[in-house]
Image: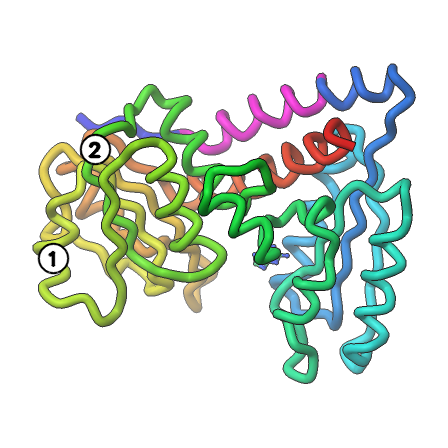
Amino acid sequence: MYKLIDGKKISAQIKDECREKAARLNEQGIKITLAVIQVGNDPASSVYVSNKKKGCEYIGIQSLSYELPEDTSEEELLALVRKLNEDKNVNGILVQLPLPGHICEDKVIRTIDSHKDVDGFHPESVGALCIGQLGFVSCTPAGIIQLLRRSGIDIAGKECVVLGRSNIVGKPMALLLLRENATVTVAHSQTKNLKEVTRRADILIVAVGKSQMITKDYVKEGAVVIDVGIHRNAANQLSGDVNFEDVAPVCSAITPVPGGVGPMTIAMLMHNCVESASRS
Ligand code: GUN
């Protein structure tokens, strides 16, 4: 029988811990402020941004909301980021991605002060993670480490396979697992004999962006499977990158979609905001 890894419960624990830390900082006169910038009104981004603001409210973090029109110029956005960099009352700056095509995401991310980079996307944050120094870690992979730890799953010495190599999930995930002393393989769309590779995994992290691609023939008996994907079909049902019904019976533990990795991203964003305030 597999264990269901409960992201809702674990994210609630983390948020409550953040709330306590925020209250202690408040008692010392330290207020926490997150600036959230959205350009345009992509519906999925609006949902994420709204959930982030609700998270802030629960923790006791002030959120400053900047909803900019789709035709905002790159220079206008960069000027806002620079202004927020200078603002001593702002601890975190989050620019919701994707940005409209005429704005260079890389340039915007680089402009954010790395001390306020609560998304962990700045090259300095990624570099710090790579060489084991203090910096902000991308929220989804950091949340996955918490899911594993708080479910009593040992990482050290395990064969971990990360399927996907994005800058936001796959690459930082691999670095974090390495920091936890796992043996790490990163597989991707060009990997040969993919099933052979994924079947080596004691812990398989799937971030491919294809609904229900992973069936039980990709998974070793007794493996832990973490599903980062989230997709909505025409009937409005949610699914992950893993075919849950097929895979769950061969796993020792698995995350559901929804209610697995998803809620962890916001919890870790809150963690990074509180951390930013206590560091400053
Ligand atoms: N778009 C999708 N996920 C994220 C995220 O974690 N942070 C930001 N800024 N944009 C996103």
Quarter of the C terminus within the rendering: top right
Residue 125 lies, in percent from the top left, at 58, 49
Please state if 40 lies on the left or on the right of 196 as rendered.
Answer: right
Q: Residue 158 at what x, y percent from top left?
A: 21, 33
In the rendered image, residue 190, in percent from the top left (x then y), is placed at 22, 71
The image's mark for residue 58 is none
* Residue visible at 23% across and 50% down in the picture: 185
Q: Which residue is mark 2?
A: 158
Q: In the rendered image of this protein, does residue 86 appear above or below residue 148?
A: below
From the viewer's perspective, tell me whether residue 229 is left or right of residue 107: left
Q: Is residue 1 above or below residue 49?
A: above
Check the picture and name the quadrant holding the N terminus: top left
| Residue 241 against residue 1 in the figure, above or below | below
| The magenta stretch spans residue 12 | yes
Report the side of 99 relative to 78 (left or right). Answer: left
Q: Earlier in the sequence, mark 2 or mark 1?
A: 2
Magenta run includes residue 124: no
Q: Answer with the quadrant where ligand 1 appears in the image.
A: bottom right
Q: Is mark 1 within 8 Å of ligand 1?
A: no
Task: Check disc 1 and give the amino acid type.
Answer: Lys
- Distance of label 2 from label 1 (alpha carbons): 18 Å
Residue matched to label 1: 195
Q: Going 33% across and 19% down the picture, which residue do you hit?
A: 152
